[in-house]
Image: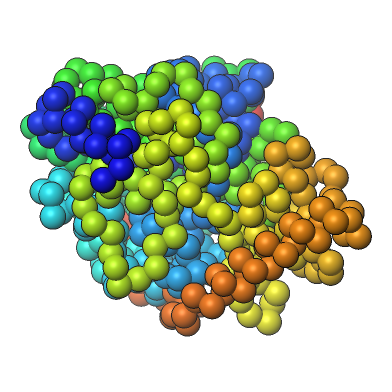
Amino acid sequence: MTVVLLLVALTLVAASARLPNFVVLFADDMGFGDPSVYGHPTIRTPNIDQLAMEGIRFTQWYSAFHVCSPSRAAMLTGRLPIRSGCAGSGPDGGVFPNNAVGGLPTNETTIPELLKSKEYKSAAVGKWHLGQRKEHLPTNNGFDEYFGVPYSDDMGASAWTSEKGIPLPLVKDETVMEQPANLGTLTQRYADYCRDFIERNKNNNFFLYMAFNHVHTPNFVSKEFCNTSIRGRYGDAAAEMDDAIGQIMKSLKDNEVDNNTIVFFTSDNGPWLIRELEGGSAGLLYEGKTTTWEGGVREPGIVRFPPLIKAGRISHEVVTTYDIFSTVLTLADVREPTDRIIDGRDMSPILFDVTGKTSHKCLFIYKGTPNEKLTGLWAIRCGPYKAHYVTNTHLNHTAVIHNPALLYHLEYDPGENFPIDSKSSEYEEAMLVIEAAKKEHEATLKPVPNQMAMGGNDEYKLCCDKDSQKKYSQYPPCTCNPENFHAWKCGNPV
């Protein structure tokens, strides 16, 4: 055990004689530049800001992917999505549809599965998006409880969408509780569920994964937050999510587990720029969701743990969302699986030691599963240098091959504005390192079933009642709560 981790263990024993609890707060489509603590001039996120002031804020925190399903698979398994078959099959990598045949493979091992050896209680709340079939839901992937919408909020009909297909379901464990879900009350119900889970488990060790549907479009909000932000509806949605985070943090304090709980906050991928004002911002970073530029994969990232993380720190070390896996296991004194490659790295030396350095030599940024559509490994970051072999933009999905590769020094040029001259010695030296890392990494890959290439089958859509139209003939099949199609909806301004 390192000196740093020995200090952690001794501190935790002295404080409570218990292992720490873990809370992962996961935003959807929030850009690097959206939280006010990351510089947004008109969005207010006081509770996210408070997390940063009481913990450590990272400036070089990376998601595993540029869209949501792959990045979530990586966080829960500690593995790049290319290894689990969750890197997608389309030109944007891809996400699981609402009738997905595949999902997070049952032979993958998740954080809550491993924490069971230490008798942790676990709950997943909110957006899952790793398959909606029974075997792929959270309760069959290590979680004791689940409450949420199993995919994106625009993938089912509701009062807030023009979608005409199957209504958006709200699921408790493996049962559809409400269909369509009432999005205007959803975020508060998420917060209430989290508060209840914390209170029920204050005498246990617990792992709480709160994956918000905010700020993915449509930007639904409650009456309390309707038209309250000068940033418009996106700002309203960000403020509502921030308020829920504040309620969860207050619950930790009220139940006297605050000082024994490590809280992570980040987002699954960059802002959905094609949604224009309904989407977010990557700040000074270039591009957003569905691209491998920095704006697509670099995220806000905050970790708070009062006993051991010095308040108000800012770290420029390179870390990733899939490092949460290794960090949680280390601090819970659980061994990582040895029968597979784990890409995550323990962040503890950075969190608890101001001189701590990243364990990542290189990050591998995929566009999808390699195939004839030019998906695959599009970019690599080693040290401060990032090479782009292929690029696209959110407006033009056509792949542009770069030969020689584009190379940027991200610590000098985080906006990727000024590529390094391919004839320079700096370029040659950096690319030698990157090419060697690429060769070594690709040698570790093994073919696995492509989960997203399995496509969809309507018989796997979640349905509260397949005979619902006998009762509600004027509504889509699987409607059990027709009143929610007419639920209150926030009006203009957008």
The residue nearer to you, when weighing 313 against 472, is 313
Picture quadrant where residue 107 is located: bottom left
Name the spot of residue 273 as percent of width and height, x first.
69, 44
Would residue 116 be visible to someone looking at this image?
yes
Q: Quadrant of the N terminus?
A: top left
Which residue is at 36% across, 55% downward? 76
The residue nearer to you, when weighing 345 against 275, is 345
Question: Residue 448, relative to residue 324: is it above or below?
Answer: below
Question: Residue 43, relative to residue 71: is it above or below?
Answer: above
Name the spot of residue 100 as percent of width and height, x first.
42, 70
Which residue is at 84% across, 50% downward? 419
Outermost residue toward the front in this view: 3
Rendering colour mode: rainbow
Picture quadrant where residue 483 is located: top left
Picture quadrant where residue 364 is located: bottom right
Which residue is at 18% across, 31% downward? 10
Q: Is residue 74 left or right of residue 364?
A: left
Q: Is residue 161 left or right of residue 244?
A: right
For the image shown, how many numbered marks are present on the structure? 0
The residue nearer to you, when weighing 5 against 451, is 5
Would residue 234 be visible to someone looking at this image?
no
Name the spot of residue 38 as percent of width and height, x first.
59, 26
Q: Quadrant of the C terminus?
A: top right
The residue nearer to you, when weighing 437 against 425, is 425
Name the spot of residue 285 as percent of width and height, x first.
71, 39
Which residue is at 46% across, 28% downward? 354
Q: Is residue 144 left or right of residue 393?
A: left
